[in-house]
Structure formats: structure tokens, C-alpha cells
Amino acid sequence: MLIERAYVNRSAEAVAESGDHWPWTVPCVRWLAEDGLKFGAPVTFLVGENGSGKSTLAEALAEGFGLDSYGGSAGYKYASSRAPSELGVAVRFDATAVGRRMIRGPRTRRRGFFLRAETAWDALARERLSGVPEAMSHGESFLMAFREKFRQPGLYVLDEPEAALSFTSCLELVGVLEELSRGGAQVICATHSPLLTALPGADIVEVGAHGMRSVAWEELALVDHWRRYLTDPRAYLRHIIG
Ligand SMILES: Nc1ncnc2c1ncn2[C@@H]1O[C@H](COP(=O)(O)OP(=O)(O)OP(=O)(O)O)[C@@H](O)[C@H]1O
Ligand SMILES: [Mg+2]
């Protein structure tokens, strides 16, 4: 573990004052500002509906740790990197001794990777992976990149890494995440995948209008929907298709 809790270094008054504009209007961001977010396991999944704030949160945590907000490896600064977000600059961590050394030390001491959904492909391509044959498919090269880049103990913030992956490749990604966590790394992963979230021992935080709460995999709405959909797709589709 590297970080045990994330919080926002802003007075309650400052948060209340800026409460009328994004990102402070997002319920999970309010929650982070008011209560903070505890990390109880090396792997934490963020789940929730579209627009619930998973990416907003993931980006802020990555920025707070010092990972490039454009996405990519720690210590790798992109010429096109964006200005840090209002939330990202305010995020602070209660960290373990190892985590503190990474956060407080020079940028080069930081380890990890920020896989931002929109720039994942570009960020991985820019870092020129060794031995990725041109002929590889999108998903194949993603998986290869994960295997190659996700090795060192560090903070790995992943936003929907399942997007390009098949069922089998997702299973392999679970193996990569598990290995990372055993090696002392920490993973924070926004996802819609019932497969990834089944990783044993992982914490699952459901993000929504309520803010944030820990949920068991068996109780996740997305797991329930998938289970019922696969059992009888028509039960859902008859509401969609005339
Ligand atoms: N740069 C921005 N400026 C203003 N509002 C934004 C910005 N980025 C996101 N939002 C809004 O913040 C809310 C949370 O968005 P976010 O992208 O974090 O959701 P999400 O949980 O990642 O959704 P998804 O599952 O679709 O990826 C949404 O209402 C979105 O419209
Ligand atoms: Mg998102």
C-alpha cells in the first residue's frame, strides 16, 4: 500500500464558496472534500453510472500523486500535458512510508501509471513499447503494454482499462493487477466490468448521488444487471425494442 486515505486540502468555506461549479458539484467530489476516501486494500475499484464522477475522481487522485494528467508513466512529462485541475492540486494523501517517499521526493522517484480513458492509446504509443509488432490488434497491444508497464511498485490509476479487451484479456488483466498488488503497488481503477471487480480482496467503492460507499461484489447493481441480462436478455430488451 502507498496511500491510505485521500482528502482535499481546502477549507470547508472554500469548498462551500466554489460549490456551484464543476467539479465541486459532483457528489463524490463533495464527499472527498468533506470526509475523504479511505483505501483498505491494494486494489480499489470505482464503480457507478455514467457521469457519476469516476473519471473526475481518478484524474484528481492521479494528479494529486504527481502522475501526468495527460496519462502515461510516472516521471514522464508530456509536452502536451494539460494544466493541473482545480481538484487535482487540492488532493492530499495520508501515505505509508514508501508512499510518502514517492509523493514528496522528486518527480523521478514516483512510480506508477495513469491510464486515462481518452488518451490511453496515444499515451501508450508515445512511450514506444519494446517489441510491439505493428500488426497487433488494439486489444493485444493494450494487454502487452499492461504487462510491460505495470511492474514496479507505484500508483496505478486506470480509467476503464477493460474498454479494448476481450473476456480472456480481461481475465489476464486481473492477473496483472493481482501481481501488482502483491508486489507492493496500489491500484485505483474506474470500471464498469463485473469481471475485473471480482478480483478477490479488492475494495469496491460505488460512486453516485449518495457520494461514495463500499459495496461487496455480490451486491453491485452492475453484477446483478449482468447476471439477469445473461440469464434472459429479453427481460431487458423488451423495454428497449418495440
Ligand atoms: N471538464 C469538465 N467540465 C465540466 N463538467 C465536467 C467535466 N468533466 C466531466 N464533467 C461532468 O462531471 C460529471 C462526472 O463526469 P465523469 O466523467 O467523472 O463521470 P464518469 O463516472 O467517469 O462517467 P463514465 O462512466 O461515463 O465514464 C458529469 O456530469 C460530467 O458531465
Ligand atoms: Mg469516466
Image (cartoon, grey):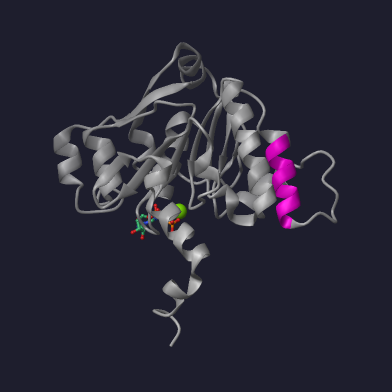
Residue 225 sits in quarter: bottom left
Identify the magenta region.
138-147
Residue 111 sits in quarter: top right
x%, y% of residue 41? Answer: 45, 26
- Indicate whether 228 appears above or below 13: below
- Indicate whether 103 appears above or below 223: above
Ligand 1 shows up in the quarter that is bottom left
x%, y% of residue 157? Answer: 52, 38
- State the residue in front, 181 or 17: 181
Residue 33 sits in quarter: top left
Spot the residue most to the front: 231
Point 60% across, 34% down: residue: 177
Q: Is residue 140 magenta?
A: yes
What secondary structure is the stretch in magenta mostly built from? helix
Q: Is residue 50 magenta?
A: no
Point 48% across, 21% down: residue: 2
x%, y% of residue 6? Answer: 35, 29
Task: From the viewer's perspective, tell me whether residue 38 is left or right of residue 158.
Answer: left
Viewer can see residue 159? yes
Q: How many numbered dots are placed on residues in this image?
A: 0
Viewer can see residue 69? no
Point 50% across, 43% down: residue: 197
